[in-house]
């Protein structure tokens, strides 16, 4: 073994192999962290579906933050009254649109994202998302039926 370590080609091969293993490990960690992030987003929307007040609080905070930002720009003279009104109208539209969006639909989409885009490796987050995906899809299906929105099954995937 000592003779092999003195050969340049062997040392280079070891370094290349170590680099490959390191890159693979970094990719795995990245994919697992992305799966976790997607799963937690799904959980947020699941919570919003079961607790609409949480959704309202979060969206209102987001709206207030965006409004405070444009209020500051208007106060400092960076925005004209017309630009301010336009930006305010835009954030109000976004706020209203998000309030009307289906939370369970987004939960399903985020779980689906974790399962389809961030595996392999089969992390704990992917397994959790895979468990919740069918229930989220069923709740979304029930929501569409309750609102009398016509759909075909392929539209839910």
Image (cartoon, rainbow, N blue to C red):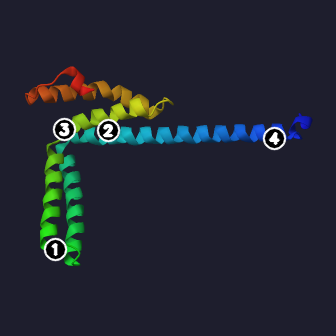
Considering only order in the chain, which callout, 2 or 3, is on the residue closer to the N terminus? 2
Considering only order in the chain, which callout, 4 or 3, is on the residue closer to the N terminus? 4
Q: How crowded is mark 2: few (under 14 residues within 10 Å), some or many (20 or more)?
A: many
At 16% from the left and 26% from the top, the residue drawn is: 142
Considering only order in the chain, which callout, 2 or 4, is on the residue closer to the N terminus? 4
Evaluate if marks 1 and 2 touch, with contact meaning CB atoms under 8 Å apart: no
The residue tagged 4 is 11
- Closest to the camera, between mark 3 and mark 1, is 1
**Quick check: 43 above or below 88?**
above
User: Could you say which disc has been placed on residue 42 in the image?
Assistant: 2
**Quick check: 61 above or below 1?**
below
Across and down, in percent, residue 155 comes to: 22, 26
User: Could you say which disc has been placed on residue 95 in the image?
Assistant: none
Considering only order in the chain, which callout, 1 or 4, is on the residue closer to the N terminus? 4
Considering only order in the chain, which callout, 1 or 3, is on the residue closer to the N terminus? 1
Considering only order in the chain, which callout, 2 or 1, is on the residue closer to the N terminus? 2
Measured in 3D between alpha carbons, the distance from the residue under mark 3 to the one under mark 2, in whole angstroms, is 12 Å
- Closest to the camera, between mark 4 and mark 2, is 4
The residue tagged 1 is 80
At 59% from the left and 39% from the top, the residue drawn is: 25
Quarter that holds the C terminus? top left
The residue tagged 3 is 102
Describe the element under mark 3 as helix, strand or loop. loop
Across and down, in percent, residue 136 comes to: 26, 29
Q: How crowded is mark 4: few (under 14 residues within 10 Å), some or many (20 or more)?
A: few
Describe the element under mark 1 as helix, strand or loop. loop
At 34% from the left and 33% from the top, the residue drawn is: 111
At 44% from the left and 34% from the top, the residue drawn is: 118
- Closest to the camera, between mark 1 and mark 2, is 1
């Amino acid at each position: 073994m000592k003779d092999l370590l003195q050969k340049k080609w062997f040392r280079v091969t070891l370094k290349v192999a170590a680099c490959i293993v390191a890159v693979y490990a970094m990719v795995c960690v990245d994919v697992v962290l992305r799966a976790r992030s997607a799963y937690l987003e799904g959980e947020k929307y699941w919570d919003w579906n079961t607790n609409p007040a949480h959704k309202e609080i979060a969206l209102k905070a987001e709206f207030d933050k965006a409004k405070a930002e444009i209020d500051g720009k208007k106060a400092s003279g960076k925005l004209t009254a017309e630009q301010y009104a336009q930006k305010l109208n835009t954030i109000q539209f976004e706020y209203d649109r998000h309030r009307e969006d289906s939370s369970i639909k987004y939960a399903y989409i985020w779980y689906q994202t974790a399962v389809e885009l961030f595996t392999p490796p089969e992390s704990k987050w992917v397994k959790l998302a895979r468990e919740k995906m069918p229930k989220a899809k069923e709740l979304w299906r029930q929501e569409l039926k309750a609102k009398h929105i016509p759909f075909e099954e392929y539209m839910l995937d």
